[in-house]
Amino acid sequence: MNIPDGILCSKTHEWVLEENNLATIGLTDWAVEQLGDVVFIELPEIGASFSKDEVFATIESVKAASEIYMPVSGVIEEVNEELINSPELVNDDAFSAWLVKIKPTNFQEESSGLLEYNDYIDEVQ
């Protein structure tokens, strides 16, 4: 698995990578491993606005259904449509199977509470 440089993780198991004023958001590999085989993902509509820590998506696996929280505030710019028909792609590689891309509204301030990937893994294990 290829973990992108600069990735930040929330304590609720989402990752975010900010590049060129867009933030890509997904679920961490640890979270996907805990869920097991993913069978359904519900994603928001483009243009929807979410605040930090607000539920923006849901994911269902053979084990459980879980809510997915926005790690930083922003407006949905792009949705990974491929996951709607093939949610199991998240199980193959949690970092390439991103969920949404947002235009963050306050990235610098809100990302200060997020963890670098290695610190996140140390905390969850």
Image: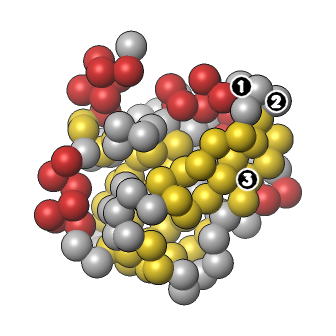
Query: Are there few (<14), some (14-19), or many (20+) residues within 10 Å of tag 2?
Result: few
Q: Residue furthest bottom?
A: 47
Identify the residue at horizontal 60%, vertical 81% (top origin): 46
Mark 1 crowdedness (10 Å alpha carbons): few <14, some 14-19, many ≥20 = some
Q: Residue at x 39, y 57 (%)?
A: 53
Question: Mark 2 vs mark 1: which is more N-terminal?
Answer: 1
Q: Which residue is mark 3?
A: 41
Q: How many marks?
A: 3
Residue 39, by quadrant, is top right
Instruction: Look at 38% across and 21% down and name the residue there.
Output: 124
Marker disc for residue 62: 2
SS label for mark 1: loop
The answer to which of 44 and 54 lies nearer the viewer is: 54
**Lower position in the chain sequence, tag 3 or tag 2:** 3
Identify the mark at residue 36; answer none if there is no mark: 1
Q: Residue furthest top?
A: 125
Spatial separation of the CA atoms under disc 2 and disc 1: 7 Å
From the viewer's perspective, is 39 left or right of 89?
Answer: right
Q: Which mark is residue 113?
A: none
Mark 2 vs 1: CB contact within 8 A = yes
Q: Position of residue 17 (x, y in %)?
A: 35, 54
- Mark positioned earlier in the residue sequence (1 or 3): 1
Amino acid type, label 2:
Val
